Image (cartoon, rainbow, N blue to C red):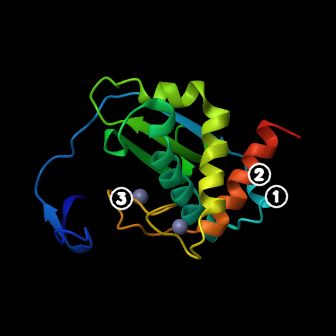
Amino acid sequence: MVSYQRRQTGSGRVIGDEALDLPARHLRTRAVWYTVAEGLLAEAEIDDDAVPGAVHAAEHAAIGILPLFATCDRWDIGGVSTALHPDTSLTTVFVYDGYPGGAGFAERGFLRGGPWLRATRDVIAACECVAGCPSCVQSPKCGNGNEPLDKPAARRLLDAVLCRLDPS
Ligand SMILES: [Zn+2]
Ligand SMILES: [Zn+2]
């Protein structure tokens, strides 16, 4: 279904979802992604129910911090996270350039993947909020109204991924 959200001016709070009778639009662009194997999810103590909130929160935090690595604005990039993506057959987090053909931001994220993910984890770990806030895992441009988001699970997920990336 194609739809758009109505938001309150100022707060950005979603106040309605309106269906649109239009064909879906396609954006051909470039993306960077990582997958999380089932064993790693188990290691991070993230059960099936918690996976969508964990990857969604990790995706938002990664988008929020990418401007530090790729000199872009968070509005230049988008993300998709899913517990099971048909192209990877795994739990996957994508961050993509929000411009047709790509703009090089995702690629810069790829080239600095380790530091980028570490900074993402640090942002989540350092934020004093309990359940997630705009400084860590909430996004002003989320197409899903910031649902679901599981901040503690996102942190465990990134810890496990980084452990595998840089075992020290
Ligand atoms: Zn926070
Ligand atoms: Zn979102």
Circle 2 residues within 10 Å: few <14, some 14–19, many ≥20: some
Q: Is residue 159 left or right of residue 102?
A: right
Which residue lies under the disc numbered 1? Answer: 43
Residue at 34% across / 60% down in the picture? Answer: 140
* Image location (x, y in percent) of residue 157: 69, 56
How far apart are labels 2 and 3 at the CA level?
25 Å
Image quadrant, ligand 2: bottom left
Question: Badge 2 is on which residue?
Answer: 160
Q: Is residue 89 left or right of residue 69?
A: right
Q: How far apart, in angstroms, are the residues tagged by discs 3 and 1?
A: 28 Å
Going by the numbered disc 3, the residue's amino acid type is Cys
Q: Are marks 2 and 1 in contact (CB under 8 Å)?
A: yes
Where in the figure is residue 50, as x and y percent of width and height? 62, 68
At label 1, counting other C-alpha atoms closer than 10 Å, the crowd grade (few under 14, some 14-19, many 20 or more) is some
Q: Secondary structure at mark 1?
A: helix
Q: Is residue 154 above or below residue 17?
A: above
Residue 123: image quadrant is bottom right
| Residue annotated with mark 3 | 142
Lower sequence index among marks 2 and 1? 1
> Would you place residue 152 above or below residue 25 in this image?
below
Nearest the eye: 26 or 72: 72
Percent position (x, y) of residue 114?
Answer: 67, 35
Q: Secondary structure at mark 3?
A: loop
SS type, badge 2: helix
Gap between marks 2 and 1 measured at Cα: 7 Å
Q: Which residue: 60% across, 71% down?
A: 128
Q: Residue at x 77, y 37 (%)?
A: 165
